[in-house]
Amino acid sequence: MVSARPAMVSARPAMVSARPAGPGRRQGGAGGRGCAPPMLGEWEVPEMQSLSVRTLAHSQLQDITGDIQATVEASGWRDGVLTVFVPHTTAGVTINENADPDVAADLLRALDAAVPWQAGYRHAEGNAAAHVKASMMGSSAQVVVEGGRLRLGVWQSVYFCEFDGPRSRSVWLAFAGR
């Protein structure tokens, strides 16, 4: 018997906390000995921050755009490219429509139809479908930052894609710019 796991689409703010992604937050310089980071023209070496995301359902697309924008502002990132990276093998990230929550629900429904939870997979943990869906969605997305604001289309948001929840997860933000 195939048991359906509940899917959830969340447009509410994620339970997210931002923190530096490592000692000193900046990489580069003279071996991390307190020297200023190397500069490439006006562009700095990449900086990183980490968000914590708590998902509430087994399969869920959670809008994290507001949390990413808040981190951009708090970090003083002005102009450049932001990479949003999910360091998990059963979760991903995508950019898609935010105006109609049915779009996210339809994405989850289509992924469930294409990759059913029970399909004779060989992976012993029993979550092979989550690994396949995460690979289909991808582990990273890039967003242009201009004037301290994410440059997304009118109807676009950044979604954390959970396929093996609920769990506490991380999202890494790497900014290259000024």
Image: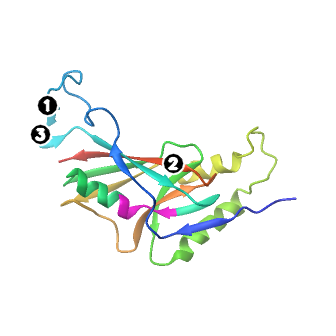
Depth check: give the residue in front, 165 or 111: 165
Quadrant hosting residue 5: bottom right
Q: Residue at x 55, y 57 (%)?
A: 55
- How many C-alpha atoms fall within 10 Å of the one at disc 1: few (<14), some, or many (≥20)? few
- The secondary structure type at the circle numbered 1 is loop
- Whole-percent x, y for residue 103 in the image: 54, 73
Depth check: give the residue in front, 9 or 14: 14
Q: Amino acid at mark 1?
A: Ala
Q: Residue at x 58, y 48 (%)?
A: 135
Q: Please give the label number shown on residue 36.
A: 1
- The secondary structure type at the circle numbered 2 is strand
- Whole-percent x, y for residue 152 in the image: 33, 66
Left or right? Give the position of 170 relative to 78: right
- How many C-alpha atoms fall within 10 Å of the one at disc 3: few (<14), some, or many (≥20)? few
Determine which residue is flagged by label 3. 41
Quick one: quadrant of the N terminus? Answer: bottom right
Left or right? Give the position of 78 relative to 60: left
- Whole-percent x, y for residue 113 in the image: 71, 63
